[in-house]
Amino acid sequence: MACNMQAEPIGASMPKLAGAHLTIPARQSAVREGLQCLFNTILLQSLPADERGTAEIVLAEALNNIVEHAYSCYEGEIEISLQLRKDALVCKISDTGLPMPDGQLPSGKPPILGRLDSLPEGGFGWHLIRSLSKDLEYHREGDRNFLTFRLDMRQSEP
Amino acid sequence: MQLMAEERGDIMVIHAMEDRIDAAGAIQFKDRMRELTQSQPLRVVLDLSRVAFIDSSGLGAVVAVMKSLGPNRKLELSGLTATVQKVFRLTRMDSVFTIHDQVPDGLQHAS
C-alpha cells in the first residue's frame, strides 16, 4: 500500500536533533498506515531494532486507545509529533476527543491471568505503555488532550 | 490477514503470512483462525515467524482463539520475533502459551 500521509522530517541535516510530524484520521486502519509511514522515516529507521520495536508498541497502544475511547462517539484527527533527542525519542500525541475519565491516566495494572476460560483478552494497553515509557504525562487544554512521554534510545551511531 | 494451514494428522500448523497482527486486523485474524480450526485438530501450532509486530488487540485475539479451542485442544506458538516476544513477556502471556523457537520437528513447512 502506498504511503499517502505526510511525515515531515525536521532538520534533516541535523540528525542529532530531528523529528517527524504526522496527522491521521482517528481510525484503526489509519493508525496502522500512520505507524508504517513513521517507521519508514529516516528518523526511526536510524534507531536500533529493539528500540524501534518498543516505540512501535507504545505508539500503537496510545493511538489505538485514542481511537477506541477518546473518539468512541465521533470522528476526528490525531496529531503525532516525534523528536529525537540525544538519548530519547520524545513523543507528543494530541486529539480533540473525549477527555480521560476523571482527567487521569489509567493505572495500567496488568490484568490477572487466571484460568484458561477466564483469561483476559484486553486491558493490556496502559500496562505496556507504562512499562516501556518514561515521564508519561497527560493534560487537557480546552477541548484538546495531550499525551507526552519519552522512550529511552541507544544511539546506533557513535 | 492471510493465514496458511497445513494439517499433519491431529496437528495443524497455521502460518501467519502477514507482518502484523494489530487492532485493524484482530477481528479478521480471530475469525479466520476459528474457520481454519473447525476441523477439530487436537494441536494447533501458530507460526508467528513472519509477524514483526503485535499490539494488545492482536494479543487479545490470539488469547481468544486459544479459549475458543476449549480445554481439550491446545494452541501453541512458534517463531516469536523480538517485538512480539516483548509483548508476550510484559503481559506474562508467555507463561500461558507453549512457545516453540521454531515449528516443531516433523511439522516444518516443506520449502
Image: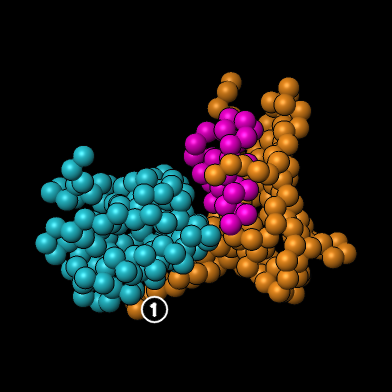
Chain colours: A orange, B cyan
Q: Quadrant of residue A64?
A: bottom right
- Which residue is under mark 1? A118
Instruction: Give the residue type that dot 1 points to.
Output: Ser
Residue under the point 44% across and 73% down: A120
Membership of A41 in magenta stretch: yes
Magenta residue check for A74: no
Determine if residue B77 is in view: no
Q: In the rendering, at what x and y percent does residue A111 appear?
A: 48, 70
Kindly indicate the quadrant of the structure image that contains residue B87: bottom left
- Seen in the picture, residue A54 relative to A49 is either above or below; the reply is below
| Majority SS type along the magenta span | helix
Residue under mark 1: which chain is it in?
A
Q: Nearer the viewer, residue A56 or A89?
A: A56
As drawn, A85 above or below B41: above
Pointer 1 local density, CA inside 10 Å: few below 14, some 14–19, many at least 20: few
Q: Residue at x 65, y 43 (%)?
A: A4
| Residue pictured at 68% horizontal, 60% vertical | A26
The magenta stretch is A29-57
